Image: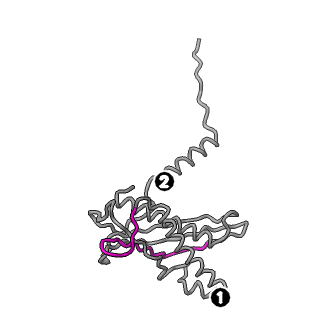
Amino acid sequence: MPLLRSVPRPPSSLALTLLLLVCLAFGAGCGPRWVIVRQASPAPFNGSSAFNVDKVDFTGLVVGEKSEAEYLGGKDPEQQASFQGDKAGMAEAFMNGFDDAKGPVRVAAPGAGVFIVKPHITFLEPGFYVGVAAGASRVSVTVQIFDDKQTLLDEIAISSKIPASMTNPSSGGRLRDAAHDLGRVTAKYVLMRTGLD
């Protein structure tokens, strides 16, 4: 009498979709979010190092494919003021993001032995949301870390992308969310470099 063998059923499309999402989630989360441009070796930082985060710099900002001046040239005074408000909100959000994720990193006023973290937002794409169509907001920052003698030690580049949706329709809100995310990632880099992570 022949033996009966069970033939495995192919996985359902739902199971395959879930598996793909898990793989993507773990794949995206495995590596760091920053790109190293320059890194002092050996690391001059340790768990007792103190850092001061300088205010966010927007010098030379590119908005979409235009310089900031070109971008603002096509806006009315109210829109120009709103954009300046968005930049101020982004600077605050970056600092809040850093504070939220800094953990045991010591923050201090500038002075002898204090490392300076200088964030420079170089690019932003405001994105849009018009119900039937949407474009994500994107922000890129270059972060440099200097010693107290203004010697450049480390430099990294980080990007953040915030989707536009019905629950997040405001470009100003998305830009602030992106800046907060960039501040958090910067803090994680500092944690890693000090050995506190």
Give how far across and how far down residue 21 sits, in percent: 57, 49
Quarter of the rendering containing residue 149: bottom left
Q: Secondary structure at mark 2?
A: helix
The N terminus, quarter of image = top right
The residue located at (39%, 60%) in the rendering is 191
**Comes first in the chain, label 2 or label 1:** 2
Main SS of residues in magenta: strand
Callout 2 amino acid:
Gly
Query: Which residue: 30% across, 71% down?
Result: 113
Of residues 162 and 21, the one nearer the viewer is 162
Query: Marks 2 and 1: CB-CB under 8 Å?
Result: no
Residue at 69% in and 67% down = 133
Residue 162 is one of the magenta-drawn residues: no
- Which residue was labeled with disc 1? 77
Secondary structure at numbered mark 1:
helix
* Mark 2 Cα shell of 10 Å, populated few (<14), some (14-19), many (≥20): few
